[in-house]
Image (cartoon, rainbow, N blue to C red):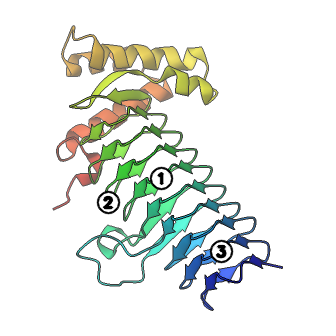
Amino acid sequence: MTRIHPTAVIDPQAQVHPDVRIGPQCVVQGPVEIGAGSVLYAQATVMGRTILGTGNVVFPGAVIGAPPQDLKYDGEPTLLEIGDNNSFREHVTVHPGTDQGGGRTMIGSDNLFMIGSHVAHDCSIGNRVVLSNHVLLAGHITVGDRAVLNGASACHHYTTVGRLAYVGGLTRITQDVHPFTIVEGHPARIRACNSIGMRRAGLSEDEIQPVKNAIFSIFVSGKMSAAEAMAGVEAEHPDHPLVQELLASIRASQQGRQGRAAENGQR
């Protein structure tokens, strides 16, 4: 039987799995779907066309699925789709999509959203991502698997944070963050390869070292232009999948507006 505190308010439209726990003064509003094993602690709110998979935990004061903070939004029935085993800590806010952005915000599984972090409309978050306290994602942002964004970093709309990237605290991201890189500073700069994160993800030294060398050659050493360095890296590692992933990200960003590949063609 569903364990719902008597002070919680549950919309009749909501579909709540029988073993979900819902604490005091929670609000579940609209055609929400909440999967097995999920927990809503006191004063958590889930609303709108929001789908929560299994094993998600929503802490006090978090608001999941409130209408987008976009002046173009006019009540369209857009969606927020969330996978499994995510943790939304206190005062996290996550918004559904807009018609202009495809109508859907998507969050994968096994992610940690720390206190006060914000995911705006039309974002796409992968798996095993960490958003530390008060990280701010504007609309239309993509964050790849196992990326880590540290406290109070903020991302411009349409930016992409590649998988296994690491963003330092208080960093303002206005251009794409390439996979496997460490980015930090004002203005944001690529400082090194995120070799520690790559090792933690189970990648071998044989996989990591060519990426580390490529990042140093293209962004850190300053011995040649980025274009020359990329050509040299391409010639040296034509079949290395991680190096090719890095190079593809760089080229896509170069073709986008202000270094944002996803903004190519946007107005």
- The local crowd at label 1, few if under 14, some if 14 to 19, many if 20 or more residues have their Cα within 10 Å, is many
Relative to 124, residue 149 above or below: above
Q: Earlier in the sequence, mark 2 or mark 3?
A: 3
Residue depicted at x 37% and y 69%: 102
Q: Nearer the viewer, mark 1 or mark 3?
A: 3
> Which comes sooner in the sequence, label 1 or label 3?
3
What SS does tag 1 mark? Answer: strand
Foreground pick, 104 / 226: 104
Q: 260 and 75: which one is in front?
A: 75
The local crowd at label 3, few if under 14, some if 14 to 19, many if 20 or more residues have their Cα within 10 Å, is some
Provide the residue designation for mark 1. 125
Q: Amino acid at mark 3?
A: Pro
Name the one closer to the observer, 46 or 189.
46
* Label 2: element kind: loop
Q: Quadrant of residue 160?
A: top left
x and y percent of residue 114 in the render? Answer: 51, 49
**Quadrant where the image shows the N terminus:** bottom right
Res. 246 image quadrant: top left
Q: Residue furthest right?
A: 1
Q: Are marks 2 and 3 in contact (CB under 8 Å)?
A: no
* Distance between the alpha carbons at the discs numbered 2 and 3: 32 Å
Amino acid tagged 2: Gly
Q: Residue at x 33, y 67 (%)?
A: 101
Q: Is residue 86 left or right of residue 227?
A: right
Q: Report how far apart the C-alphas of labels 1 and 3 lie in the structure.
A: 29 Å
Q: Do tag 1 and tag 3 residues touch (Cβ < 8 Å)?
A: no
As helix, strand or loop, the secondary structure at mark 3 comes to: loop
The residue at which mark 2 appears reads as: 139
Image coordinates of residue 12 in percent, x first then y, are 63, 92
Can you identify the residue that label 3 sits on?
24
